[in-house]
Each structure stands twice: as structure tokens, then as C-alpha cells.
Image (spheres, rainbow, N blue to C red):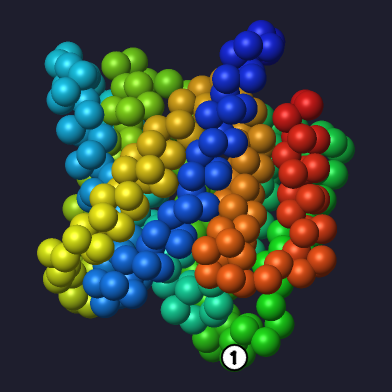
């Protein structure tokens, strides 16, 4: 049985997903600044992002009364645990990829392959091939992402390249599974509850790995401000919007919306850091927006 969504519901879900993609784009810059100012390893930054984001979301639940009547079913516990594992794996694998290859190539491999993995996963789940329009929008998106982020001089070689790309693909696969897994609601778990407890779970599970690299956080105003922003806007808020949008949006469109992350990051780097975006980059960004529009029409 198919469900036809009304235009208002579809538009709201699209707006939530697009906003999440843009907010995620600010997270890359915030995470880099936190690592630089606090002298943290990327894995520690990932764990702090999960713990801070989850903690802020739980605090919001406490203030709004959302902690009352929490579900204690096996389905809810399974959803929280799997969400935490997938969120943690996505963050940690991505930052491990960055250690071996450049940020741009890691982002390209992760975000570029995400819609592909989601389309393949949805095809297996639904037992039917992706529609030609879906394949076309994915192709346009991948080309756009390559044009936007490609930097041949920054690519590693040999074992480092294999490990970097491998971790990036694992990161993409983890988030693709999260996208498909959380599309079906669980009674008593709204997007904010799922975000809050999923992030806390992921942060706790992967904290031992981060502790090996050191997690000492200097209590200076600049570090605290960056950490607060990283945990709130591109993490707690963005993931809540993303999980909310998943409830009424096609999984492939949700994956395509994440492509706004590297586009936002590139534009911010040009504005904040003074990095110039080439004509090739602007063309790539335009193709990403075109692909997003194509997928939203489905």
C-alpha cells in the first residue's frame, strides 16, 4: 500500500531536511576551530559533539516536560541503541578518514556515496530497482560534489589512500543505514527524544576510543563558545530536524539534502577564511542544488 503525502507535509519535511543540511555545513568549520583552539584529536571532537549535542537535547526535553512518559519498550530501546551506534560510527569513521586523506576528499567520498547507498538499500528493502529519475539525480549530485570539492594535490597514496577511502565509505554506509532505519516511527519516540538519547549513547560508546587520544578541554571563553555552538546548532538542532523530516520524506531525498553540507562548508570557507571558490566549484554547487530539486519533485 502506498501513502500519498499532502503538499504541506512534504514541504515541511523538505524544509527540515534542507535546513539540517545547511546547519551541518557550519559544523565542519566549528569542529575544526574546536580542534585548533582546544588541541583535540578529531575523534575526541566527534565524541564531544555527540555528548554535548545529546546533553543539550536532554536539557531541552527536561525543560519542556519531554522526559515524562518515556517509552520503556524493547522497540524504543533498540531504536536508541542502534541510532547511537550508527551516529557514533558515522562521526568517528569520518574523522578517521580525514586523518588519512584530505577533508575535501573524505567529504566527497562520504556525502557523495550516501545517496547511492540509500538508493541501493531502499531498492533491496522494497525489492525493486531505483527509478530512472532517482538514478539521474544521484548522478548529477555526484558530479556536482566532485566539481565542488575535488583537489588532486591533496589525495594520499598507497595504504593511506585505501584506509581513508575505506573509512569514508564506512561512514557513508553507517549514515545510509541510519536514514533507512529511522524512517519508521517508534511509539513514544519523537525526533528530539531519538536525537537526545541516541547521541548520548553514541558518545558514551565511543568515549573510550577518544580518551586514548586525550579529551582535556581548556575552559577558556573561546573554546566554550565554540563547543556550545557545535553541540547545539549543527548537532542537536540539525539532527532533530533531519530525523523529523525523515518521517514524511523519501529516503533518497533525505540523503540528497545532506549534500548541502559540503556546499555550505565551501561557501563559509570562502567567506570566513578567505578561500576563493573557483568557477568549477560554483558549477558544482549549482549541480548539487539542481539534483536536490530533481529529487524533491519525485
Residue depicted at x 53% and y 69% = 273
Q: Quadrant of the C terminus?
A: top right
Q: Splitting the image into 4 quarters, where does residue 110 fall?
A: bottom right
Residue 291 can be seen, yes or no: yes
Position above or below: 145 against 181: below
Q: Splitting the image into 4 quarters, where does residue 68 fall?
A: top left
Q: In the visual, does 100 lie left or right of 107?
A: left
Q: Quadrant of the N terminus?
A: top right
Q: Nearer the viewer, residue 202 or 282?
A: 282
Instruction: From the top left corner, tell me how far across and down residue 250 is, in percent.
Output: 64, 28
Instruction: From the top left corner, tell me how far across and down residue 61 is, in percent.
Output: 21, 25
Instruction: From the top left corner, tell me how far across and down residue 22 is, in percent.
Output: 55, 44
Q: Splitting the image into 4 quarters, where does residue 192 fall?
A: top left
Per the image, the residue denoted by label 1 is: 158
Residue depicted at x 16% and y 65% = 220
Q: In the visual, does 140 lie left or right of 229?
A: right
Crowd band around label 1 with a 10 angstrom C-alpha radius: few (<14), some (14–19), many (20+): few
Q: Nearer the viewer, residue 243 or 282?
A: 282
Amino acid at each position: 500500500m502506498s501513502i500519498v503525502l499532502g503538499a504541506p507535509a512534504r514541504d515541511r519535511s523538505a524544509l527540515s531536511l534542507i535546513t539540517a543540511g545547511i546547519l551541518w555545513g557550519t559544523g565542519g568549520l566549528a569542529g575544526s576551530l574546536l580542534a585548533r583552539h582546544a588541541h583535540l584529536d578529531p575523534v575526541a571532537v566527534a565524541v564531544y559533539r555527540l555528548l554535548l549535542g545529546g546533553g543539550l537535547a536532554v536539557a531541552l526535553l527536561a525543560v519542556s516536560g519531554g522526559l515524562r512518559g518515556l517509552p520503556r519498550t524493547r522497540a524504543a530501546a533498540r531504536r536508541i541503541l542502534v541510532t547511537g551506534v550508527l551516529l557514533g560510527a558515522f562521526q568517528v569513521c569520518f574523522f578517521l578518514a580525514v586523518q588519512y586523506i584530505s577533508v575535501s576528499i573524505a567529504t566527497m567520498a562520504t556525502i557523495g556515496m550516501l545517496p547511492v547507498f540509500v538508493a541501493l538499500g531502499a531498492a533491496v528493502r522494497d525489492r525493486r530497482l531505483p527509478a530512472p529519475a532517482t538514478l539521474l539525480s544521484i548522478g548529477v549530485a555526484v558530479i556536482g560534489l566532485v566539481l565542488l570539492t575535488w583537489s588532486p594535490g591533496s589525495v594520499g597514496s598507497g595504504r593511506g589512500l585505501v584506509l581513508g577511502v575505506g573509512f569514508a565509505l564506512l561512514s557513508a554506509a553507517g549514515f545510509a543505514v541510519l536514514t533507512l532505519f529511522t524512517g519508521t516511527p517508534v511509539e513514544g519516540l519523537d525526533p528530539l527524544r531519538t536525537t537526545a538519547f541516541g547521541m548520548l549513547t553514541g558518545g558514551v560508546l565511543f568515549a573510550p576510543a577518544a580518551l586514548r587520544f586525550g579529551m582535556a578541554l581548556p575552559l577558556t571563553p573561546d573554546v566554550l563558545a565554540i563547543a556550545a555552538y557545535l553541540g547545539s546548532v549543527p548537532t542537536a538542532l540539525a539532527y532533530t530536524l533531519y530525523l523529523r523530516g525523515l518521517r514524511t520524506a523519501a529516503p533518497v531525498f533525505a540523503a540528497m539534502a545532506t549534500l548541502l553540507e559540503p556546499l555550505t562548508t565551501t561557501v563559509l570557507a570562502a567567506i570566513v577564511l578567505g578561500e576563493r571558490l573557483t568557477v568549477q566549484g560554483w558549477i558544482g554547487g549549482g549541480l548539487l542544488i539542481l539534483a536536490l530539486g530533481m529529487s524533491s519533485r519525485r
